[in-house]
Image: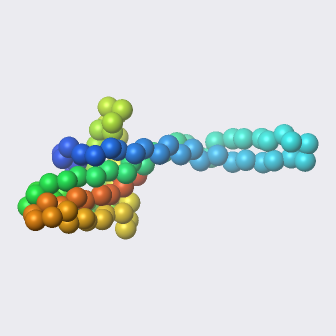
Amino acid sequence: MTDVFKWKTMGTPIGTDSLNVNEASFGDGYTQLSTNGINNASEAWELTYTGQIEQIGDVRNFLRSHVINSFKWKNPYGEEKLYRVENKSIKSDFVGGKVVSISFRFIESYAP
């Protein structure tokens, strides 16, 4: 069974779509393009969650345990896909008092 990211993210999600493309340019200005592989399209999301330090602890534990293991998440387009947390992308900002803002990056995954 695949885990599900259950927390609602706050802030403004930023998505990046990437295509894995082979490109060959010729001297006459012609460029030949072709897709590379069966999973040649992928996406990544930069997200932020802000809350009380007790809540952030649960989010942080989930994020740290899913750098290698994938999970289901519904992106802002409403598409439920598999993602994992990009290594070294988890950053904590202690806003003040017991409020913490944690930012992280989800990258699309193709297998649990």
Q: Position of residue 81 (x, y in %)?
A: 35, 40
- Residue closest to the eye, 107 or 91: 91
Residue 32 location, quadrant: top right
Please tell me whether residue 88 is drawn above or below residue 52 in the rendered image.
below
- Residue closest to the eye, 63 or 98: 98
The residue lying at 10 percent from left, 65 percent from top is 97
Q: Position of residue 45 (x, y in %)?
A: 39, 48
Residue 6 location, quadrant: top left
Q: Position of residue 43 (x, y in %)?
A: 45, 45
Residue 77 location, quadrant: top left
- Residue closest to the eye, 90 or 51: 51
Q: How is the image coloured?
A: rainbow
The residue lying at 78 percent from left, 48 percent from top is 24
**Residue 16 falls left or right of residue 69:** right
**Residue 64 falls left or right of residue 77:** left
Please tell me whether residue 58 is drawn above or below residue 16 in the rendered image.
below
Asked whether residue 38 is in view, the answer is yes
The residue lying at 20 percent from left, 66 percent from top is 94
Q: Position of residue 89 (x, y in %)?
A: 36, 63
Furthest toward the front, the residue is: 96
**Residue 43 falls left or right of residue 104:** right
Furthest toward the right, the residue is: 28
